[in-house]
Amino acid sequence: MSEDKDIEYMRMAIQQAGEAAAAGEVPVGAVIVCDGKVAAKARNGREERESALAHAEILAIEEASQKLGRWRLSDCTIYVTKEPCPMCAGAIYQARMKRLVYGPADQKAGAAGTLYNIVQDGRLNWQLEVESGVLEEENVKLLQDFFRARRSLYHP
């Protein structure tokens, strides 16, 4: 996929993350693209769904699988506004995605190269292409602004 397309789809993921922030959720968004078409868009929904599983990546994978009628998404790319956590990296691996594109690394929970590398572990039977740092500054700003605002609620 071209760099321009990566930026276009990451901007869609950032829009989802912005919607998450507006709803009081940690601002993470995900977009899944298969054969050049958007198959799913999702944002974090843990608070409103009261579910630890309602991460943007998980919700997007579920939506894409339902829309496409299959669990193997081996012709798909997932765009995520920050590096996936272990649960989400595992789900991306399980969906047999072709490619993962994300913004900033996650120093506390990153599982696509920072703390772990689930999606490229040679001991597993599937590895993905990974592209990191796409629109990193915009994604970092969104996260920083969200957490700064949250902290100011509790520590004015």
Image (cartoon, grey):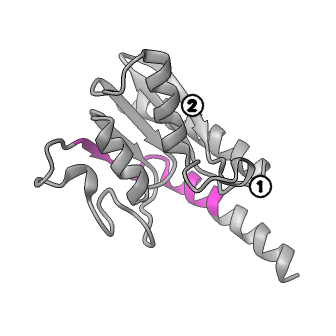
The kind of secondary structure element at disc 2 is: strand
Question: Could you tell whether 94 is left or right of 146 in the image?
Answer: left
Vertically, is 67 above or below 98? above
Vertically, is 22 above or below 79? below
Q: Which residues are magenta?
A: 128-143
Instruction: Give the class, few, some or many, for how many residues have Cα within 10 Å of label 1's Cα (few <14, many ≥20).
Output: some
Question: x, y percentage for residue 37?
Answer: 45, 16
The count of marks equals 2
Question: x, y percentage for residue 149?
Answer: 79, 67
Does the magenta portion include 137? yes
Residue farthest toward the bottom in the current orientation of the protein: 155
The kind of secondary structure element at disc 1 is: loop
Question: Could you tell whether 38 is left or right of 89 in the image?
Answer: right
Residue assigned mark 1? 24
Instruction: Give the class, few, some or many, for how many residues have Cα within 10 Å of label 2's Cα (few <14, many ≥20).
Output: many
As rendered, which of 6 and 61 lies closer to the eye? 61
Q: CA distance from mark 1 to mark 2?
A: 18 Å
Assign the N terminus to one quadrant of the image: top left
Contact? badges 1 and 2 (CB < 8 Å): no
Q: What residue is drawn where x is 34% and y is 50%?
A: 90
In the rendered image, is residue 1 in sight? no
Mark found first going from the N terminus, 1 or 2: 1
Assign the C terminus to one quadrant of the image: bottom right
Q: Three-letter amino acid code at disc 2? A: Lys
Q: Three-letter amino acid code at disc 1? A: Gly
Label drawn at residue 41: 2
Residue farthest toward the right in the current orientation of the protein: 156
Q: What residue is drawn where x is 49% and y is 47%?
A: 135
Question: Could you tell whether 107 is left or right of 95 in the image?
Answer: right
Question: x, y percentage for residue 83?
Answer: 43, 55
Does the magenta portion include 34? no
Q: What residue is drawn where x is 63% and y is 53%?
A: 51
